[in-house]
Image (spheres, rainbow, N blue to C red):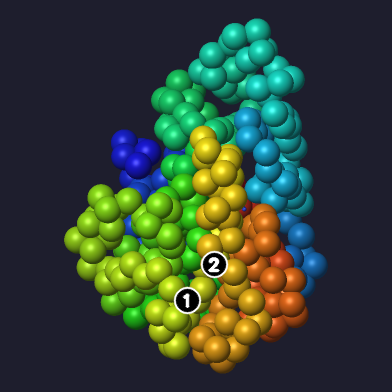
Amino acid sequence: MSNQTAESIQNSFSGKDILSLSQFDKPSIQTVFQRTAEIKKQFQSHSFTNTLQNTLSALLFFEPSSRTFSSFAAAIKRQGGQTLEFQNPGQTSSTVKGETLEDTARVMENYAECIIMRHPDVGSVDRVARAVDVPVLNAGDGAGEHPTQALMDLFTIQEKTGTLNGITGVFAGDLLYGRTVHSLLKGFSLYEQVTIYLLAPDRLQVEQSMIEELTSKGMTVHTIASTEDIPSDCVFWYWTRVQKERFEDQNEYEQLKHAYILTQELVTKRAGTDTLLMHPLPRVGEIAIEVDNDPRALYLNTQIKNGMYTRMALLNLILNR
Ligand code: NCD
């Protein structure tokens, strides 16, 4: 997995890169949560603050994105900051002329206080972070990590249940290529008595080395292959999309894409009365539309809102606002 060399946060965020959940310890996560909760409260009572005024953040997205891109842009603009936006710079910027990632980023750091970047290659965001002095935030590096998504998901679960200790949850879908899953599992490994069920076809199961790392930190991990094996007392279900863009063989993708579908019938059969139904989005058929109106479904509302607030909190902490 990527990002092994990223600097620990240790509750001091100013000027730091956010590349991986492995940079975090519990107190640092708590600091993000505290700031997120404060900002959420302010926004809900319409008392807006312009703490990101006079900052410019470069959004460099070399891979398609609607949610993460707009979530960061909204987080920045809603607090009075500005953005320099590059979507698909692979087609529209000097990278077409053969410019290296490092050079593109070095130019950007002359304009911007921070760089928020998504790229299809694992480790590419780390490379950029090493090349520039401004803080770099990983908005997804291939099948590597997606730390800001994990922080918002942890915040959502903690907000709903009051704790991240003693939790039992399910991850389903593409656990091999799903970067949100990798970051979120690393986050959970910091907490006590966490039991995780990994529901995936063999081909898309979490890598054995990662399972070993998680269990060595005290997490109880069960790999399962059938929805029948989902226990009835789960705090959350975290469903994910099979990552089409990571497959060389599209026939294989077609065979695996709907290995597990979250339907109302399954919810009725196996979810608890308070089980949180989560998904990082986009979904492409793995959650039936009928589930959207279930009050336990958080993917189209709470998760999205909390994503913006969490990114606001992180940017304020990193930019020392
Ligand atoms: C995820 C991603 O890009 O990794 N989406 C997101 O950022 N919310 C999940 C996915 O694309 O399946």
In the rendering, at what x and y percent does residue 223 appear?
33, 67
Going by the numbered disc 2, the residue's amino acid type is Tyr
**SS label for mark 1:** helix
Marks 1 and 2 close (CB-CB < 8 Å)? yes
Q: Is mark 1 within 8 Å of ligand 1?
A: no
Q: Which one is earlier in the sequence, the residue at label 1 or at label 2?
A: 1
Going by the numbered disc 1, the residue's amino acid type is Thr
Find residue 260 and name its label. 2
In the rendering, at what x and y percent does residue 174 appear?
49, 55
Along the line of sight, the residue nearer the viewer: 85 or 181? 181
Where residue 240 sits, quadrant-wise, is bottom right
Is residue 233 toward the left or the right of residue 192 in the image?
right
90 over 169 or under it: above or below: above
Along the line of sight, the residue nearer the viewer: 105 or 303? 303
Is residue 97 toward the left or the right of residue 44 in the image?
left
Label 1, label 2: how many angstroms apart (C-alpha)? 8 Å
What residue is rendered at 72% in x and 46% in y? 66
261 over 116 or under it: above or below: below
What residue is rendered at 40% in x and 69% in y? 225
Q: Which residue is mark 1?
A: 227
**SS label for mark 2:** loop
In the rendering, at what x and y percent does residue 239 appear?
55, 66
Residue at the right extreme, as displayed: 46
Quadrant location, the N terminus: top left
What residue is rendered at 63% in x and 53% in y? 312
Where residue 108 sits, quadrant-wise, is top right
Residue 314 visible to an observer of this rendering? no
